Image (cartoon, rainbow, N blue to C red):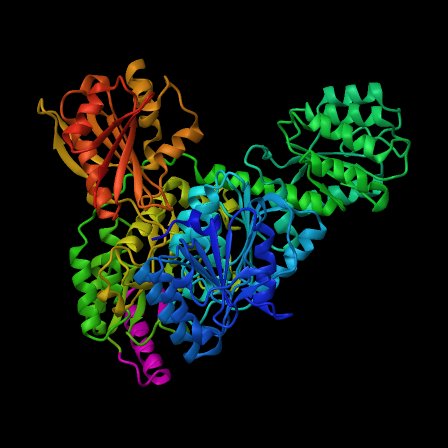
Amino acid sequence: MASMERVFNPRAVALIGATEREGSVGQAIMKNLLLGKDKRLIYPVNPNRDSVMGIKCYPNVAAVPGHIDLAIIATPSKTVPALVEECGQAEVDGVVIISAGFREIGEEGLKLEQEIVRLQEKYGIRVLGPNCVGFIRPRVALNTSFLRDNPEAGEVAFLSQSGALGSALLNWALHAHIGFSTFISLGSMIDVDYGDMIDYLGEDPATRSIIIYMENVRNAKKFMSAARGFARTKPIVVIKAGKHASGARAASSHTGALAGDFEVYDAAFKRVGVVRVDEIGDLFNCAAVLDSRHLPGGPRLAIVTNAGGPAVMAADSIIDYGGELTKLSEESIRVLSEHLPQYWSHGNPVDILGDADINRYEVAIRACLTDSNVDGLLVIYTPQGAAPPTEIAELTAKIASDRRKPVLTVWMGEESVGGAREVFRRNDIPTYATPEQAIKTYMYMYKYKRNLDLLYQTPEELPVDLSPPKGHLSVMIRKAAKEGRTLLSEGEAKRFLEVYGIAGLAGELAKNADEASIIASNMRYPVVLKIASQDIVHKTDVAGVVTGIESDEELRKAFATMMDNVRRTQPNVKIDGIYVQKMLKNIEYELILGCKKDRDFGAIILFGLGGIGVELFKDFSIGLPPLNQILARRVTEETRVYEALSKGLRNRPPIDLRLLEEVMVRFSNMVIDFPEIAEMDINPLAVSDGKIYAIDTRIIIDPKALEYTEPYPHLVIVPYPTKYITPWRLKDGSEVILRPIRPEDETRESEFIRGLSEETSRFRFFKIIKDLSHESLVRFCNIDYDREMAFVAEIQEDGRKAQIGVARLVLEPTEKKGEFAVVVADRYQGKGLGTKLVDMLISVAEEKGLESIYGIILPDNTSMIRLCESLGFRIDRRQDEVFAELKLK
């Protein structure tokens, strides 16, 4: 596959379809390319012309002298596949297909597109488009589009699926003086997509944040992996079109009916730390301030203003958007009272009055920023007082320059405050025309940071079996599919829960009233009767559930009545019998836990308020598997019922949240293990006397999933790779478990690093490290197994688990290679562990199709150099380091 760097920073560009014809796309692109003619070679390609705009024109790509990094195709759609083939044969690195007329016009266009995909895969050429506007990179003077606007250089990258909207926003940003590192119209995304661009821009030093206009994601797995990799360091802001375009479609489960497209997208964004905004203006407002270096520590805002009205508006907005108008400390009130007129507001907002001069602003701003109750500051100016707007702006910028807290500004007016706004732009201080815009943006900043903090908290280890005995469940599914069934029986569904350790209630299928009577007597009354039929999904809809049966007489009467009612109202359904289940008394809470397959993001998990009103109240949230304890907590916290669960409601006690999280993790593991599950509901998931029970479970299978051969085809986030868990012995016979690292390992990882000798620490980290921050440990332990692998060697010491070695392989997302590192605790060096760990990394690299792996070694780390030599690495001794590389292909 060609290098993305060659595509987006080319040394030679060919324009296929170049022309001088006035008003044509080929002319507009040629004019834009010539703006960067001093930085690269420009080759017009058109068989009908000898020159274009004074530059020699070539009849085809093959006739161009020298290598072409990027070709732009602006010709009719029917000619495009042949031109892509020419580019492939000429070893062009990438093409931008401006042309339209592909899948959007129907079957004929789709065939053309499919042929381009075939050629792209054949030649390994990167393709942007088709049906796109192209891309612009101001810093390298490269404009491959036909747009008239050339934006300023900046630190924001803008990706747009829609060319028309993208060009309109580009024009708007130009007049708002918003600069871009890159503007890209992605078009149909048959190759280069969101994931590719996030990977590329994530490594781009000129890009500080990424904003996206998205209609659909196309390759969700690639997007999720790339976004997860960079959202912590480079904020990604998305506006998703189609919020109300399509809800959940007809489904056989409550989960399927509730979880619509937009809700799933929203959950996916949260899962990887992406910020979703509601309005186009929010895209640019957030991109300007979402710098990972200056994020608010909390929602508590202070306001400094010289006008009461705008301050009241700002205070209202703080409450509306979920923030907190903080109470200033007594010390701040004292300082402000000493320096401000006696009739100042004596609270927050800090109203320094309309005649405020520069000194009042300085006192107020400094007091608020030093107040421990304040997480962020909003400064409002209206042009009515003694202080000139530009002078106040310069003061504010100076104070904020060494800020640890975010400072946002609102200079109200137009021409009179234009100079002040320019001061803020020059000093990277967010500035807005209204208080509402400022507050809304601050809360996006806070939610972004809070979401990342919550996502990457260290989860607790839960007593959950990662590999339960599940082979017979696969047999059960195949048997059901062979019988033409898609709905598993109550007993089959109950078996799934038993295997994964989710408690249910005793129950058994009865063919007649006598059998039901015996079953009920054995399990003791009270019991519940539930109709059992493959043709009836929602039992309550056909009076197929009777609760509170206390005696044999009641049971027989209810049995006969239920059978008569169902046969009368549903004469064509096949009834298998009636399921008799132990009834649970004293239910404190009824919840729902379910899953379904989303068309873009695969398996999703839904949690919320359950019972018969589940679709009426619609109190639910969505998570994406795999879940751990922290991620399960995040899903529960996003429901309205969470407050009752955590604090209790009226005479009902709070529930055991750890137990609920354990149930959700067990459920997540079941979803991970079975792509054959199309939809599933546990409703109600009942809480009673401190325990949690699955009362009614419905599992709908997808027989087509039995044909899947690749692992986890239904997941967009790779789960914990249990296949790599390996028992092993050191040379001295000590038993070791080698396994992939997990987020739960953070404490043991920290202890391991602290226990390294200074020399071993220096060999691994190139400096002596004893203590790592939580953020650094998260980076080590909470990894994406698709693009990184870390193995830990674990041993039992004094009755507890301890790490004695770690090996890590980090893939380069835009290349087919990876960097490895390994470290072994001092006491266990020389026992073969280092060799074993590196050998495991080599196997992973081969499995992932890498062409090579390499490591950087300090020259005096002779034992590591010898280890690499013994495994076939090529050793390149340089001045300050040793470069060890193993070619795999």
Height in image: 64 above or below 274? below
Q: Position of residue 44 (x, y in %)?
A: 51, 62
Q: Position of residue 161 (x, y in %)?
A: 52, 61
Residue 359 sits in which quadrant? Answer: top right
Height in image: 776 above or below 683? above
- Residue 609 visible? The answer is no
> Magenta: predominant secondary structure element?
helix
Q: Is residue 585 left or right of residue 803?
A: right
In magenta stretch: residue 555: yes
In front of the other: 775 or 637: 775
In magenta stretch: residue 312: no
Q: Position of residue 413 (x, y in %)?
A: 83, 45
Height in image: 418 above or below 607? above
Residue at the far top: name it: 758
Q: Position of residue 170 (x, y in %)?
A: 64, 55
In front of the other: 499 or 309: 309
In front of the other: 184 or 823: 184
Q: Is residue 280 left or right of residue 683?
A: right
Which residue is rendered at x = 48% and y = 55% of the image? Answer: 13
Which residue is rendered at x = 49% and y = 41% of the image? Answer: 204
- Residue 145 visible? The answer is yes
The residues colored magenta run: 545-574
